Each structure stands twice: as C-alpha cells, then as structure tokens.
Image: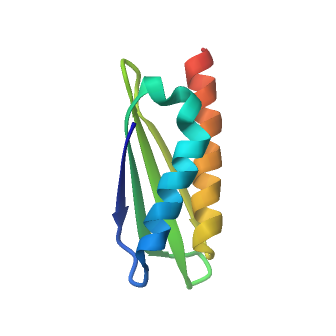
C-alpha cells in the first residue's frame, strides 16, 4: 500500500507525516490488498468563520474500483486528520462489501 503525503501547510514538521502514515496503516491495513495507492493532501483554507482551518483531502485508489475521495476541514489539524481517516475507513468498508 503506497501512501503519499503532500503537505502544503505553512507551519509543520515531519512528525505530522509520520502520524498520518501510521494512522492510515492502522485503519486500512485489512483492506491493503484492494488498495493501489493513497494520497493525503494537507492545506490551509479559509473557514466559514473567517479563520484559517486545516483541510485534509484523502484519495484512495482501488484495484478495479472507482477512487474514494474524502475531505475534512477543522481548526485542529489532528482532529481533521482523524476524522478524514475515519470517514475513509467507513466508506471503503461499504464499497468493498457491496
């Protein structure tokens, strides 16, 4: 399972990429045989309240199935990362069981 992390955040360090890699591997390891690659993009976006939020875009490329794309934006980076991975896990599970 190939995981690509594209970090477009202004302030960040390598620990965020390590955290993302670890969380994705834990959450999606059971479906690894069906996944060709995962792209995780981080960026800052302007939220509805006029403040910057952390935006996560997760794309899962599957063998012989359509891609799964999930987005999440939150003020807290780790909340956004966790939520987008949780959503992806549920969506992937539903897609593979149908």
Q: Nearer the viewer, residue 1 or 42?
A: 1
Tell me what residue is drawn at x 58 percent, y 29 percent. Answer: 30
The tally of labels here is 0
In the rendered image, the vertical position of residue 65 relative to residue 85, given as above or below: above
Q: Is residue 4 visible?
A: yes
Residue 49 position within the rendered picture, expressed as x and y whole percent measured from the top left = 62, 81
| Quarter the C terminus occupies | top right
Residue 52 position within the rendered picture, expressed as x and y whole percent measured from the top left = 52, 81
In the rendered image, the vertical position of residue 75 relative to residue 88, given as above or below: below
Tell me what residue is drawn at x 65 percent, y 36 percent. Answer: 90
Q: Is residue 88 visible?
A: no
Residue 35 position within the rendered picture, expressed as x and y whole percent measured from the top left = 42, 30
| Quarter the N terminus occupies | top left
Q: Nearer the viewer, residue 25 or 52?
A: 25
Q: Quadrant of residue 83?
A: bottom right
Tell me what residue is drawn at x 42 percent, y 70 percent. Answer: 43
Q: Is residue 44 left or right of residue 94?
A: left
Tell me what residue is drawn at x 61 percent, y 38 percent. Answer: 89
In the rendered image, the vertical position of residue 67 relative to residue 55, given as above or below: above
Indicate how the structure is coloured in the image.
rainbow
Residue 28 position within the rendered picture, expressed as x and y whole percent measured from the top left = 56, 37
Residue lying farthest to the top in this orientation = 98
């Amino acid at each position: 399972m190939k995981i690509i992390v594209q970090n477009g955040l202004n302030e960040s360090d390598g620990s965020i990429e390590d955290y993302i890699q670890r969380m994705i591997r834990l959450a999606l390891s059971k479906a690894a045989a069906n996944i060709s690659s995962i792209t995780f993009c981080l960026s800052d976006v302007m939220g509805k309240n006029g403040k910057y939020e952390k935006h996560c875009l997760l794309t899962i490329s599957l063998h012989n199935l359509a891609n799964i794309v999930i987005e999440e934006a939150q003020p807290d980076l780790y909340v956004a990362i966790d939520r987008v991975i949780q959503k992806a896990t549920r969506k992937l599970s539903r897609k593979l069981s149908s």
